[in-house]
Amino acid sequence: MKVLGIKIIKVIAVFSVLIFSILMLKTISQYTSFDKNIGFLVFKQQVVGNPYWMAFFYIHIFSITLCLLAGLTQFSNRFLKENRNLHRIIGKIYVYNILIINVPACFVLGLFSNGGLIGITGFLIQDVLWAYFTIAAVLSIKKGNIIRHRNYMVLSYAVTTTAITFRIVKHLLYNETQHDYELFYGLNVWAAFLINLTIAYMILKKDRLLTGKIQAGKENTDTDK
């Protein structure tokens, strides 16, 4: 029963990320006009004149959805077994996208984040952990440690999807007449981050319990034989 529950939760999570990735594509599409007075850029007028900041902004928003969608395929055991080569290719796309494109871009964007010191600190810590989890996942698979690799990939993807959780929390709770935008933004950065890490921890904990039960079952079967 618990195994079925875990599978249902995973299916719901996959569909949720897929749906919100599509919605993010719709949001991102508005920036293809390169207008500096639309969407999020309305709140960043103090830096939209900086060509370096703008370059990192566009690099980030136009590549992050690929990260989200690429990560979705990496946690299906069936997909892994039937498409090992494709799994490796998509995994490399995900890793290169994060380490070469998004980590540097998000570090620069984080330095100019909304939310004051709270927001800046939250974004920079996320960025460092994003790089750490992803690198650790790569090093683990190179050493042949599949379980450790998967665990770090779950943590890496938890950071990747904070963009989705951030928007969910904002749409559910933010009221411009009741909340200070800067304070809410900074607190939301941390809230999204902590929510995702908590979910990742719960997934890893359930996986360990499930793996332990399977191994115990095998040992009992071997003993009976």
Image (spheres, grey):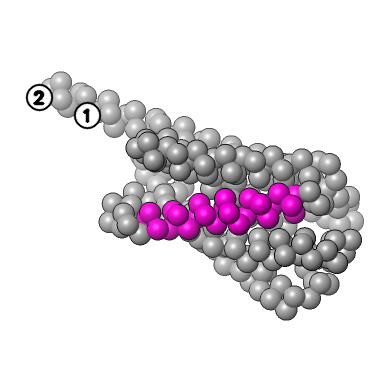
How far across and down, in percent of the image, does residue 60 sit? 66, 60
Q: Amino acid at mark 2?
A: Lys
Please, which residue is most extreme toward the left here?
Answer: 225
How far across and down, in percent of the image, does residue 221 sit? 17, 27
Say whether residue 72 is left or right of residue 57: left
Q: How much space separates mark 2 and mark 1, taking CA atoms?
A: 11 Å
The crowding category of the residue bearing disc 1, from other C-alpha atoms within 10 Å (few below 14, some 14 to 19, many at least 20), is few
Identify the residue at image location x=78%, y=45%: 120
Please, which residue is most extreme toward the top here?
Answer: 223
Residue 43 visible in rendering: no
Q: Is residue 224 above or below residue 185?
A: above
Magenta span: 87-110
Q: Which mark is residue 44?
A: none
Which sits in the foreground, 126 or 183? Answer: 126
How far across and down, in percent of the image, does residue 112 sit? 81, 52
Residue 3 visible in rendering: yes
**Would you say the magenta stretch is mainly helix, strand or loop?**
helix
The tally of labels here is 2
Which sits in the foreground, 171 or 71? Answer: 71
How far across and down, in percent of the image, does residue 57 sit? 72, 62
Say whether residue 118 is left or right of residue 1: right
Residue 225 inside the magenta-drawn segment? no
The residue to which callout 1 is attached is 218
The residue to which callout 2 is attached is 225
Residue 106 inside the magenta-drawn segment? yes
